Amino acid sequence: MEIYLLKSTACMGIFLLFYKLLLEKESMHHFKRFFLLTAVIVSFIIPQIVFTEYVEIEPITAVTQIKSINEPQNIPPVVQAIEKSPMNWYLILWTIYGLGVAGFAFRFMFNLLKIWKRIRNNPKTKHSAIYRILLKEQLAPHTFLKYIFLNKQKFETKSIPNSVLLHEETHAIQRHSLDVLFLEVLQVVFWFNPLIYVYKKTIKLNHEFLADSAVLNGQEDHLNYQNTLLSYLSNDSFNTYQSVGIANAINYSSIKKRFIIMKKQTSKKGIAIRSLLLLPVLALMLYGFSQKNVIAQNTIKDINIEITKTGDLLMNNEPVALEKLSTEVLRTNQNFGPYIIKNYLTAHILYDENQYGLIDQVQTELAAIGISNIEHFSKRTTNIFGKNGFQASEYHGKTVDEAKLIRKNNVFNEHKTDANNEPLLEIAWIEVKNENEIWFNNQLVPLSKLNEKIKVKFPLAIENNKLSAQIYATEIINSGFTDAITKELRKLKTKSITIFSDKYIMPKNEYEETVEITPETVILKTNDIILQEIATKKQLSTYNALAKKYNTMISEGGNIRILKSDVDQLTYIYGLMSIEQKTTAEPFPEFPEPPPAPKAPKVAKGEKSNIPPPPAPKEPETLIESSLNFPAPPRSPDAPKTLNTTNYASNQLKEIIKNQDPYDYLTLDTKVINGIPSTKHTWYTLDKPSSPVAPSPPTPPSPLDYAIDMAKKGATFFYEGKKVSSDKAIDLLKKNKELNIESREKNGKAEVLITKEPVTIR
């Protein structure tokens, strides 16, 4: 803020200096009025003008710095003392500023009120569109807006010269008071700026120049008019009262300057020269006081690789080793993701015929970092066709946004006809950044409003059934989501729909190698198709039956019995379901949390537990009982030996508790869980369920399938502690089957951790 005020003040000072030196003494008064008002306004605008300069980032060569640590370096610690001032200067300065604004605002309103009272409380006469207010006070004639204030006695006795009346009428007709009001408002806000006062004084003086010029152009004699002005200034009676500061008064100061200007005549050539001199001054102020915003941006650069006769490699005329090629390519096109590298980066290979075998090695290195646009040609071919050097691609030297626009136009040109080769009237371009972000016509649009926006943009195309749609996905896109968009577009009778995507996820049972192209076919152009298992009809039937049963139990309240096997099966099938299946299926039940296990009673040290001991084990009477490993009491040496007598029952009991399902035997009262009083008692049952027990859930999905499912749900991925994109995570799991995966929830968002180390469950 301080810098802005300093810059604006400097601009006002330069404009004022230009005026004083070249304009004030000239008779170009209307131009001067325009200049002064514009100078004030422009002085506040210039510091806010921002010139943006785009600077290309040059590739940074990695430099390794080796520091000797043979001898310890004694670096004295730097202690910086920070003293906190007991006074809040920020608050003090704002308080002073606020008081100043309040004071000047009060003064301004007081002057307006004073003039309004004079208009209301004194008689007035109308002359054309101007009102003459007749005052009892001995005030010099002055003007505010369309009101001229005159002494009543002198006006009625016709003691006021016609030249004075014409002078004041000029102020009213040319509306000089509006200029003064504008400066008064600025003075309230910027009361601390001394140049505001200078400008107000200078503008009011120029008003006098304009009024004097109007009087003299009315054939008034210079000498008589000057004597009239002097008579008003020499009259002591006018010193008793003063006119209001916001009015234009005839007894204004600088009378000597006015007399000099009355005799000055500026030629048209002089006016033109002075006007032209203003242009370099304005240019210098724009350069010196405007803001400069330097934005660093990357541009796409072609990779030009030459394979020499000796088998050496040159990349962009610089020697490079084959094993360093991919590193140098990424350094040249730094900060570009895999999508940009694959779709917009072009590599040209110029090879010598004797080194043809190196082409495959170079292409392998380029393909390893994702470059798919590779062209190669021999030196002999270029000589035959007369080509000199490499030919730049259409994306070379362009920013990412410019390259996307070029590609978008190319797509438009390629799809000017529909599937039946009939011309299309319009093409609706829809950009999908993720399943929650759809862009159309440079606006973020919800799916429910997409058709409405397209109708506004292409009413004629829709009316004539000549609309085509291009869906452009910048990330992984799911077929269920594109189906939803396609369904909306079909409502507009869209003739052809094409989907462009880097990666596309679709159900495995819907994938077909070849399909018949019809007007209803959606054309998919993608770099990679990910086939995903989805819920079968049988699984959907099982899910709907279980979900409906539990949703009914939960809605009715009371005692419900939940089986853990049912919960696991519902969860698994729901994870397989597509977006469309989830939309039509039963809602997933909102299961209450199972109650905690009862705590064991505590026994103080030294006290005897009141828990009764278990009954004494029974002596096995038969060989069968002995084979069940029941513990047996001590036997006499003569007793017959039995089979193993380890603590079989105890082990069996522990195993049952370990594998016990908390939902199997505990029936929950949902009203009590939700804080609603209930008169029903908690009961236990060993009855068999009325419906057959559901089969055990299928084998859990692989880490890769789980990662794909979590990517659809918007999870955040980390590899060895570093955040990675969902695409990168899926690629890692594809390439390395030994990676471990762990999922957790943080601040309500799912996080998936991928690591080479075994996952530890805490």
Image (tube, helix red, strand yellow):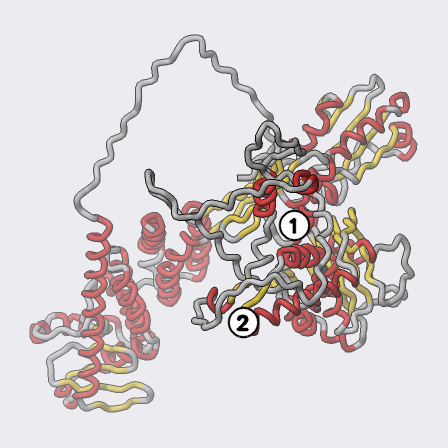
Q: Position of residue 761 (x, y in %)?
A: 56, 39
Going by the numbered disc 2, the residue's amino acid type is: Gly
Going by the numbered disc 1, the residue's amino acid type is: Ala
Q: Quadrant of residue 69?
A: top left
* Residue drawn at point x = 75 percent, y = 33 percent: 368
Q: Which mark is residue 282?
A: none
Q: Is residue 18 visible?
A: no
* Residue drawn at point x = 75 percent, y = 24 percent: 314
Q: Nearer the viewer, residue 612 or 372?
A: 612
Whether 502 is drawn above or below 259: the answer is above
Q: Position of residue 347 (x, y in %)?
A: 77, 35
Circle 1: element type? helix
Distance between the alpha carbons at the discs numbered 1 and 2? 36 Å
Asked whether disc 1 touches disc 2, contact meaning CB atoms under 8 Å apart, the reply is no
Whether 306 is drawn above or below 540: the answer is above
- Report which residue position mark 2 lands on: 557
Count residues near mark 1 (Cα–Cα under 10 Å), then give few for <14, some for 14-19, many for 20+: many
Q: Quadrant of residue 551?
A: bottom right
Q: Is residue 748 visible?
A: yes
Q: Nearer the viewer, residue 556 or 745?
A: 556
Is residue 367 toward the left or the right of residue 595 in the image? right
Q: Position of residue 217 (x, y in %)?
A: 34, 74
- Report which residue position mark 1 lands on: 711
